[in-house]
Amino acid sequence: ETLESSDINVLSVSIGDICIALMSKDRDMQMRVPEATRHFLVGSGEAESHVSAAWGDLREPASGDHLFDSGGLWQLYREGPDYTFRFTSPAYGEHPYKQARFNADFTSGEVLLHADYFDHDEPAIPLEYPLDELLTTNLLARGRGVELHAFGMRDHDGRGYLFVGHSGAGKTTSARLWEKAGVLVLSDDRIIVRYLDGKAWMYGTPWHGDAELAASARTELHHIFFLGRGTANE
């Protein structure tokens, strides 16, 4: 079916200089991104991954080999060369509320939202967390870079400092202290690192922690610190 351009709803998001183009040709599906991702919206252009979204019926069991259970919202399956994520939550019901199927290198995919669970008069969020992070992580894993559980900031001289730590190590505490000092906090929980043009770059992501600090910006990485939980801040 050929549709006029005005009938195609398109959103483009760039995280870590990796662009994902999300498109819906379903006339009654308007789309939006999560609040934290709004600053990562970009104009249309060349994208590393093209994803379509539509309403669907997800009552049928998953097909393919069951590869992984997150223990939370999602499970991963493989059928031939394709990967399928199935998302289930008691907040919706017994059937998956979302399914996302991608080709082997995650450059193309389709997201289906279980039609019975959603108000079609409200904008849908096909790339709602954790799907946006899962897709970005797999695109990074194709030789583009890595996502770290870390807090990152850029000082007044443009130098980037990366603070890596497990949950509870002090990333959020550090981020809040540095924010008070007037520096740019890229993220208080998730940082992307990429090696481009002979330099290591660190990027903010929308997947923030308790401090809710996230910036769509990058800076050259100068220092890496490993955080440990102590009895005082020092």
Image: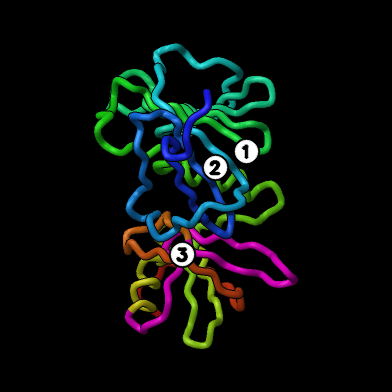
- The CA span between labels 3 and 2 is 18 Å
Given the current orientation, which residue lies at the most extreme top position? Answer: 60
Name the spot of residue 83 as percent of width and height, x first: 60, 28
Q: Which of the two discs, 1 and 2, labels the residue nearer the N terminus?
A: 1
Disc 3 to disc 1, how far (Cα)? 22 Å
Amino acid at the residue labelled 2? Leu
What residue would you read off at disc 2?
Answer: 135
Asked if disc 3 and disc 2 are in contact, CB closer than 8 Å, the reply is no
**Which of 31 and 72 lies nearest the eye of the viewer?**
31
Above or below, comparing residue 227 to residue 223 in the picture = above
Secondary structure found at label 3: loop
Horizontal arrangement in the rendering, residue 104 relative to residue 94 (left or right): right
**Mark 3 or mark 2, which has the lower sequence index?**
2
Q: Closer to the N terminus: mark 3 or mark 1?
A: 1
Q: Is residue 185 visible?
A: yes
Front in this rendered view, residue 110 or 227: 110
Residue 21 percent across, percent down from the top left: 53, 45
Queried whether the magenta region covers residue 183, the answer comes back as yes
> What is the magenta range?
180-204
**Number of numbered discs present?**
3
Residue 220, given in percent of the width and then of the height, sits at 60, 75
Q: Which residue is mark 3?
A: 216
Evaluate if marks 1 and 2 touch, with contact meaning CB atoms under 8 Å apart: yes
Q: Is 103 covered by the magenta stretch?
A: no
Q: Which mark is residue 106?
A: 1
Label 1 and label 2: CA atoms lie apart by 7 Å
Residue appearing at x 62%, y 69% in the figure? 201
